[in-house]
Every structure is written in structure tokens, then in C-alpha cells.
Amino acid sequence: MNILVTLDSNYIYPLTVMLKSLMHNDKDSSFHLYVAHSSLTENDFAKIRQSVDESRVEIHPIIIKASLLKGAPVLKRLTKETYYRLLLCEFLPPDVDRILYIDPDTVILKPLTDLYNIPMDNFVMAGAPHLFGFVNAINLARLKMNKKSKYINAGVLLINVELMRKVITTEEIFNFIRKNAKTLYLADQDVINALFDGKILFLDARVYNLDEKTYKHYNRHISLDWVDRNTSIIHYNGSEKPWNPTYDGILNPYFDYYKKL
């Protein structure tokens, strides 16, 4: 199974917690872990290695050189690390035809095999919507997307790399960003939603990308017991993080458990 993470040193700690949870809950899988970065140290990679079972995980450090971002539009909302998800076709080995991108600020509660093996057909990506009703409609209008579409969160993405290589080029991505810079409030997440509208397979956020807001949205229908039985990935997105002492989210116990492993 191919897994992609992109980060700097600030997210090494949450990444190690995510990897511990993956090792604990997906014991029958082996992984190729691609770590895209510009500044991680050997000490950072030592911490990553300590958090995985190296008999099942092959770590592939990918240093993103400045030349890869030559010509990239510069926006305050688009850091160099932000671009890595958009440019994955440029740095992944040619034999990688599918990859699961996961944000470091997540924990894994179930094996990921079912998610990884979802038929992609003509879909470039699979992701989970986090916006509902009027807020979703506003974002669709802002990005000129189909009115019947859904705006997905880019923290967990199953990516059909083989098809992505065929349908878009790096220059087309850069041109889109230049043309729409003023409306890309959510950076590469906006780019992903707009560029691949109609080519995104929608996943159940309760199962594959559960955050605090989504939990509250469905709170009449799900509980922590439901999460224990059904959820595969919890995502601690937003400014409040469970490794900060002020965090008091209802999903905090999951991060607390895996950080102690």
C-alpha cells in the first residue's frame, strides 16, 4: 500500500502518533511510505522510523527541490509544502499508480485496505465532504463548480496517480492558480476541488475523514461507540490540535490513546 505524507518538522510529532495508530490497527498490511519534504533532518526521520514496524514499512524520503516549484505562483495561502499534493506526479516514481494521501494530524482506527482498494474507474481522486447545505453551496459558487457537486476536505485523498498523469500537467495547475488567485481562500484544497470537479469520488466523512464539526453535524445519529465500530480515520483539522493543552474536542481520547503507545 502506498501512503503519502507531506510536512515540515513542526508536524513530526503528530505524524508519529498517526503512524503508531496505523501500525496498531492495520497489522496485516505492508506499506511504502513516501515522505515529501524540503527540510526534514535525519533526527526527524529517526523519529519516524521509531514509530513504525520497519519490517512492514519501507520509508521513501523525497526531497522537493526548488526547481520543481519553478514557475509556481506565489500566494500567502500557498506555502511550498502546500504545493506537494498538487505536484505529486512530478516526484513519485513512475510505477506508483495509486496512493493514499493522509494528513499527519490524523489517527487510524481501522485497516485501510478497503479504502485503498476502492474502484476508481474514471475518478482522479476520492475524498470526503466536510461542508453542508448553504456553506457547501457558497464554496461551489465561489469556485464555479457544478451546483450538484460537493466540496471535499483534502486531508485524506485516495489518488488515482495513473489517471492524474493523463488528465493534467503541472503547467495547467500553475495557470489555474494564477488565473484564480484571488478566490483560492483555502489554497490547494480549493485547487483540488475546482480542477477535478466531476472527477472526484465522494467518501463518507463519518468513516474516512471524521473531524469535530462533522461529528457534531451527525451527533443525533452517531456516538463515540458508533465511531469505535465504524470510523477508519479521525482528522484533527482546524487551528485547535489535540497535542495542545487547550484542546477539548470530543474526539480527543483517540489521540490521547495512540500517543501513549
Image (tube, rainbow, N blue to C red):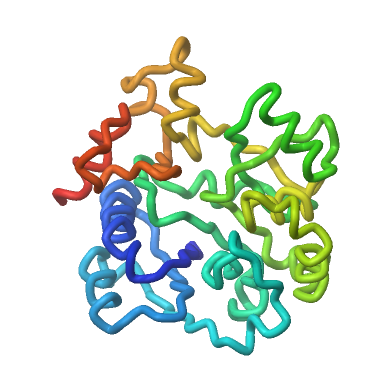
Residue 240 point in image, percent of width and height: 36, 42
Which residue sits at x=70%, y=53%? 184
- Decide if residue 60 is on the left or right side of residue 176: left
- Decide if residue 44 is on the left or right side of residue 117: left
- Decide if residue 91 is on the left or right side of residue 167: left
Residue 53, placed above or below residue 18: below
Residue 256 point in image, percent of width and height: 20, 41
- Decide if residue 188 is on the left or right side of residue 166: left
Residue projecting furthest to the top: 220
Residue 177, by quadrant, is bottom right
Q: How many marks?
A: 0
Which residue sits at x=57%, y=62%? 99
Residue 77, placed above or below residue 9: above
Residue 173, placed above or below residue 19: below
Residue 151 point in image, percent of width and height: 68, 39
Question: Which residue is more in the foreground, 215 or 99?
Answer: 215
Question: Which residue is more in the foreground, 157 or 140?
Answer: 140
Which residue sits at x=80%, y=57%? 180
Residue 128, by quadrant, is top right
Which residue sits at x=72%, y=48%? 193
Question: Which residue is more in the foreground, 69 or 200?
Answer: 69
Residue 236 point in image, percent of width and height: 39, 42
